[in-house]
Amino acid sequence: MTTKQQMIIGIKADVEDVNTGVPASFHIISGVHLDLTNKYYTATVDSYYNQDLYDKGKRALGSVSFSLSEDPPRGVDVIDWALTSLVDSDNPNPHQFTGAELVKADLSE
């Protein structure tokens, strides 16, 4: 029996876009900034009405940047680290994605 490998592709959380007021349920990382010297890390999150519209290549409703409090671990995918950090229920600065569900997809073989 073969186990399929998966990767994290986004966050599932019902939130209201801060700029438009439109509900959004699927969120992806569109950018990550790592200032290793000053230990300042940010992730920019794009929000979509739903995953289907994202999969169809539609534009995001809006974007929001978040500061990440933990250092990125070595040898780990930076997108996985950012997404996991955003949903971490032990986040010292809770926000709308704290405790949300990670969305995973099977890797193609």
Image (spheres, helix red, strand yellow):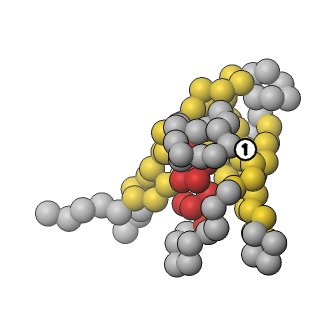
Residue 49 pos. (x, y %): 66, 29
Residue 26 in sight from this viewpoint: no
Q: Quadrant of the C terminus?
A: bottom left
Residue 60 pos. (x, y %): 75, 39
Horizontal side of 4 relative to 71 (left or right) equals: left
Position above or below: 34 against 97: below
Residue 39 pos. (x, y %): 75, 69
Q: Residue furthest right?
A: 19
Q: Residue furthest left?
A: 1
- In depth, the one of 21 and 81 nearer the eye is 81
Q: Residue furthest front?
A: 92
Quadrant in which residue 53 is drawn: top right
* Number of numbered labels in the structure image: 1
Position above or below: 60 against 4: above
- In depth, the one of 66 and 53 nearer the eye is 66
Q: Secondary structure at mark 1?
A: strand
Residue at x 64% of width, y 67% of height:
71
Residue at x 56% of width, y 78% of height:
74
Residue 61 pos. (x, y %): 77, 34
**Mark 1 sits on what residue?**
46
Residue at x 81% of width, y 72% of height:
38
Q: Quadrant of the N terminus?
A: bottom left
- In depth, the one of 60 and 68 nearer the eye is 68
Horizontal side of 105 relative to 63 (left or right) equals: left
Residue 68 in sight from this viewpoint: yes
Give the amino acid at mark 1. Answer: Asp
Which class describes the residues within 10 Å of circle 1: few (<14), some (14-19), or many (20+)?
many
